[in-house]
Amino acid sequence: MSVSMYNASIPGFLRMLGNLSAILHKAEAYAIERKIDPSVLLNARLAPDMHPLVRQVQAVSDTVKGCAARLADIDVPSYADTESSFADLQARIAKTQAFLQSIVAGQVEGSEDKVITLKFPGAEMTFRGQDYLFGFVLPNFYFHVTTAYAILRHNGLDIGKMDYLGRP
Amino acid sequence: MSVSMYNASIPGFLRMLGNLSAILHKAEAYAIERKIDPSVLLNARLAPDMHPLVRQVQAVSDTVKGCAARLADIDVPSYADTESSFADLQARIAKTQAFLQSIVAGQVEGSEDKVITLKFPGAEMTFRGQDYLFGFVLPNFYFHVTTAYAILRHNGLDIGKMDYLGRP
């Protein structure tokens, strides 16, 4: 026995997207309650040359839609990265969730040895499906979810580890 | 075909521990070069009620040694959490790496449906092996590695995403 590529990817993505959505709802309520301009939180960063909250959420979305599409061998949906409000980020998350939910386990099965090639400006990375998932997607995905959480914690939002983890 | 519990866990733990060790070497060199008391970095936090760098590294170690031992059905090694220098943290990481390397794939195989129970003060959590790995261990593991990285980025260390990811 062993683990399917589907179980190792999509359900965890969906759970964490739900947790991130709930955290962003709390952040929006916090901004309203404390009369903080939402753009202060949306543009907050942990270091001057790190990405702000909005981009962290976009990166979470990009990482999982890219992974799901590549493992399922379908086109990666293109989203415009124009989000500038909490409502926009919620819509981005909802769109990402709907895409992930449209993929059935059978489409992803057998992708553990599929050759995946990522193209970057001036560079290319090639992986086996399972190395792509475990060595690239999951570290990136959790990096951006955690950084979004940490930006909001650093800015005083009253959330804790269980908001990040959800109820597994 | 599918993925083994071993491939989904230990190799990624070892790679990220190596990346974290390299980041901490850079942090130590940065403290020396800039004449920063190392304890300033070791005790730095992103929020007053978040754990400092030392505890983030201990939590990384705890998460993976606990996972590897539970999946392999052996006792979880107990480490004293007394680290107070960069050298101590490097030793903690090395000890954790050696433990993970002592586990062979066969010990972890078949653990996907093993019942895993975690005991906390006043609470218990029970998982199937694969839900423990994908729904609890990996989110926690990457949370603490990312937070260690973010604490150091926030404190001016010149590192980037490839220090976190390593070369997959």
Image (cartoon, coloured by chain):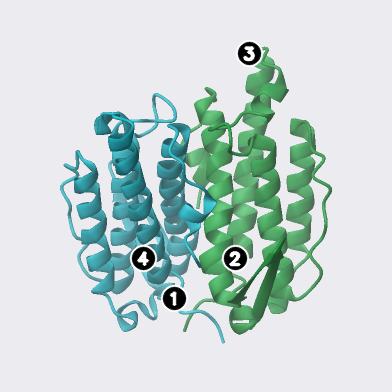
Chain colours: A green, B cyan
Q: Are labels 2 and 1 assigned to the same chain? A: no
Q: Are labels 3 and 4 assigned to the same chain? A: no
Decide if residue A83 is on the left or right side of residue A3.
right
Secondary structure of the residue carrying numbered label 4: helix
Q: As displayed, is residue A62 above or below residue A72?
A: above
Report the chain holding disc 2.
Answer: A
Select label 3 or label 1 by which is in front. 1
The reply to whether the C-beta atoms of the residues labelled 2 and 4 are less than 8 Å apart is: no
Is residue A28 or residue A144 the one in the foreground?
A144
What is the spatial separation of the Cα atoms under label 2 and label 3, in whole angstroms?
37 Å
Percent coordinates x, y for residue B113 in the rendering = 43, 74
- Which residue was labeled with disc 1? B7
- Which residue was labeled with disc 2? A9
Residue at left offset 66%, top offset 75%: A116
Give me the disc on residue B14: 4
What is the spatial separation of the Cα atoms under label 4 and label 1, in whole angstroms?
11 Å
